[in-house]
Amino acid sequence: MCPKYEDIARTVLLIGQLALYADMDGADLAFVEAVSPSLAVSLPEPPPGMFPSGPDLDGGPIHPGENS
């Protein structure tokens, strides 16, 4: 793996492991709440255009309370 992406891959893995830990019985949720924002903020911004911006022009699914 490219050294540039090793830290990103490691951080994503840690976020996944933290999510699994949070679902365990007896998990220390205060620890999860303290660590998860730090992990999330350490990820870089996604490249422009990776995610669509603005409203869903295709309409998307109908949600409760919306007109069909």
Image: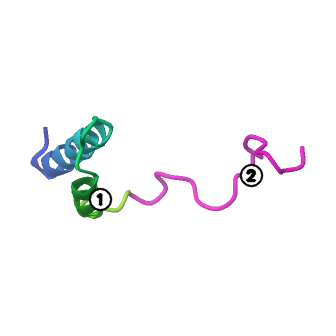
User: The C terminus lies in which quarter of the figure?
Assistant: top right
Frontmost of labels 1 and 2 is 1
Residue on which disc 2 sits: 57
Quadrant position of residue 53: bottom right
Residue pictured at 20% horizontal, 45% vertical: 14
Which secondary structure is most common in the magenta stretch? Answer: loop
Left or right position of 40 against 9: right
Magenta stretch: includes residue 57 = yes
Residue numbers of the magenta segment = 47-68
View extreme (right): residue: 68
Q: Nearer the viewer, residue 59 or 20?
A: 20
Of residues 9 and 3, which is closer to you in this image? 9
Q: Give the vertical position of 52 relative to 2 (above or below).
A: below
Say which amino acid is labelled 2. Answer: Leu
Image position, residue 40 (x, y; %): 30, 58
Picture coordinates of residue 41, whole percent (x, y): 28, 64
Q: Is residue 65 left or right of residue 8?
A: right
Q: Residue at x 23, y 49 (%)?
A: 28
Mark pair 1, 2: CA separation? 35 Å
Mark 2 or mark 1, which is nearer the start of the sequence?
Answer: 1
The residue that disc 1 covers is 33
Question: What kind of element bears circle 2?
Answer: loop
What's the mark number on residue 58?
Answer: none
At x 77% / y 46%, what residue is drawn? 59
Identify residue type, mark 1. Answer: Glu
Q: Residues within 10 Å of mark 1 (few under 14, many from 20)?
A: few
Residue 53 colored in magenta in the image: yes
